[in-house]
Amino acid sequence: MIKTHLLAVALGLALAAPAAQAAIQTWTVAGTVDSGSLLGTSYSGSFSFDDSALVGAGSEYLPVASLDFVFEGVHFDAADAAAGSVAEVAFEAGVFLGLSYIVDAAAHPFALIPGFADSSDAYFAYDAVLPALGGAGDAIYAPVPEPKDWLLMLAGLGIVGLMVERNKRRVV
């Protein structure tokens, strides 16, 4: 009986543990302009990239697979990157720094600049056509959990819960 219980607990914990890092990752980015003529304007977006080529040493840049970014009510994607630049995700020694993305939009050209030590240093900057002023804001990144990770974790916790309930009934 103890063997069965330990096996069930081990199986439950294995299922509850996060899966190995997936090749395709999806992240969100959001923030608010805190200086310049567009003070208080918010921006947000999401992007995906394949991290299977990530080595984890030195400076690395991975191209985005998909990108949707909204600034001033206008949607931008990877194809909107300024001439000579590409939307890419920056890493330093395997640490996520943020998105490098430059858009030369007619009204307000902008850029997402990756951090130096980690993504908490990342920021958003825009330029403005005179007489307006350019400015900047924070860029807050968050990974989007994959549904399969949540399902596996819930399944594992459910199995552990069932085993605990089953053992309570036997003891009484």
Image (spheres, grey):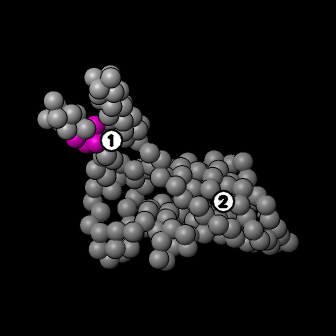
What kind of residue is marked 2?
Gly
| Along the viewing direction, whichever of 162 and 2 lies nearer the viewer | 2
* Residue shown at 52% from the left, 55% from the top: 142
Q: Is 69 on the left-hand or right-hand side of 114?
A: right
Name the residue carrying label 1. Answer: 16
Residue 36 visible within the image: yes
Q: Position of residue 18 (x, y in %)?
A: 33, 47
Report crowding for label 2: few under 14, some 14 to 19, many 20 or more residues within 10 A (C-alpha): some
> Secondary structure beneath disc 1?
helix
Q: Is 106 on the left-hand or right-hand side of 11?
A: right
| Along the viewing direction, whichever of 51 and 9 lies nearer the viewer | 9
Question: What is the CA distance from the residue labelled 2 to the residue labelled 1?
Answer: 32 Å
Q: Main secondary structure of the magenta part?
A: helix
Name the residue carrying label 2. Answer: 31
Res 4 quadrant in image:
top left
Residue 114 visible within the image: no
Location of residue 51 with respect to 161 vertically, above or below:
below
| Along the viewing direction, whichever of 148 and 11 lies nearer the viewer | 11
Residue 142 is tagged as none
Res 43 quadrant in image:
bottom right
What kind of residue is marked 1?
Ala
* Residue shown at 49% from the left, 77% from the top: 116
Q: Position of residue 161 (x, y in %)?
A: 36, 31
* Residue shown at 29% from the left, 69% from the top: 56
> Secondary structure beneath disc 2?
strand
Q: Quadrant of the C terminus?
A: top left
Q: Is residue 58 magenta?
A: no
Res 15 quadrant in image:
top left
* Residue shown at 77% from the left, 71% from the top: 35
Mark 2 or mark 1, whichever is nearer to me = 1
Q: Is 109 on the left-hand or right-hand side of 100?
A: right
| Magenta-highlighted residues | 10-14
